[in-house]
Image (tube, rainbow, N blue to C red):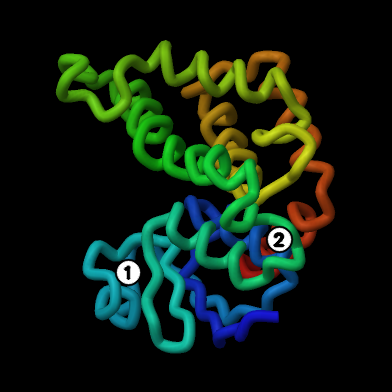
């Protein structure tokens, strides 16, 4: 088993860090949670991440920020959980693509859509077209049950958490394949455990 560093998560349940909380539950990793008030961001967070973004993770003093990097980092700490296909595994490439596609294409496309911004020319846009990005998601999830087929990975925590809020806000249509995927995701015990801990944190 790999060395497990002391983990501190700068977190707000009503943010992208909600998914990281679920991943920590899936992996069974202990973490110290620092609640971040968006209206008064703590100096400790700004000192290590001047952008003030959550999630921000500190592992034995090393700062890991950017959502996709955190997912990859955490999943690889506990390889026996099988949430990160190992180097040499045929699913490794598709897994890394699933993480990168979310950060580099899907979320930028959804933000542009929500803000009604023009995506620019095909040569300048990081994702091409919004319609093309949405089609990839629907086609991938239609193959089910998880993003990579039968194997549940950290990519599913990222996508499950993200699609939950994106469809909730009406940015992306909850088509049958997306609805079925989110239903499967919501039934995982880690999702319920993370929600319970976040409810207690807010209270």
Q: Residue, x 42% and y 13% (percent of image)?
A: 132
In the image, residue 18 lies at what x, y percent? 57, 55
In the image, residue 6 lies at what x, y percent? 56, 87
The residue beneath circle 1 is 40
Q: Residue, x 75% and y 42% (percent of image)?
A: 151
In the image, residue 165 lies at what x, y percent? 56, 37
Asked whether, in this view, residue 108 is left or right of residue 78, the answer is: left
Q: Nearer the viewer, residue 100 or 179?
A: 100
State the quadrant of the C terminus. bottom right
In the image, residue 60 lies at what x, y percent? 47, 88
Q: Nearer the viewer, residue 170 or 9?
A: 9
Q: Residue, x 63% and y 70% (percent of image)?
A: 201
Against 192, is 151 above or below?
above
Q: Cα distance, mark 2 to mark 1?
A: 24 Å
The residue beneath circle 2 is 194
List the single residue furthest toward the front: 88
Query: Which mark is in front, 2 or 1?
Result: 2
User: Which quadrant would residue 104 be assigned to in this image?
Assistant: top left
Asked if the residue under mark 1 is in contact with the one under mark 2, i.e. CB atoms within 8 Å, the reply is no
Q: Residue, x 16% and y 15% (percent of image)?
A: 121
State the quadrant of the N terminus. bottom right
């Amino acid at each position: 088993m790999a060395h497990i560093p002391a983990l501190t998560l700068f977190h707000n349940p009503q943010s992208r860090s909600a998914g990281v909380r679920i991943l920590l539950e899936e992996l069974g990793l202990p973490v110290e949670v620092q609640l971040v008030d968006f209206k008064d961001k703590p100096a400790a967070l700004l000192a290590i991440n001047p952008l003030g973004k959550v999630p921000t993770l500190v592992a034995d003093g090393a700062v890991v920020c950017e959502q996709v990097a955190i997912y990859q980092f955490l999943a690889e700490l506990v390889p026996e959980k099988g949430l990160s296909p190992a180097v040499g595994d045929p699913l490794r490439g598709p897994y890394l693509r699933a993480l990168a596609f979310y950060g580099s294409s899907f979320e930028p496309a959804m933000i542009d859509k929500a803000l009604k911004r023009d995506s620019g020319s095909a040569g300048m846009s990081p994702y091409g077209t919004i319609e093309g990005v949405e089609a990839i998601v629907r086609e991938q999830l239609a193959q089910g049950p998880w993003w990579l087929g039968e194997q549940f990975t950290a990519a599913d925590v990222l996508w499950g958490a993200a699609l939950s809020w994106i469809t909730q806000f009406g940015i992306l249509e909850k088509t049958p394949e997306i609805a079925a995927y989110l239903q499967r995701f919501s039934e995982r015990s880690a999702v319920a455990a993370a929600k319970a801990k976040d409810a207690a944190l807010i209270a």
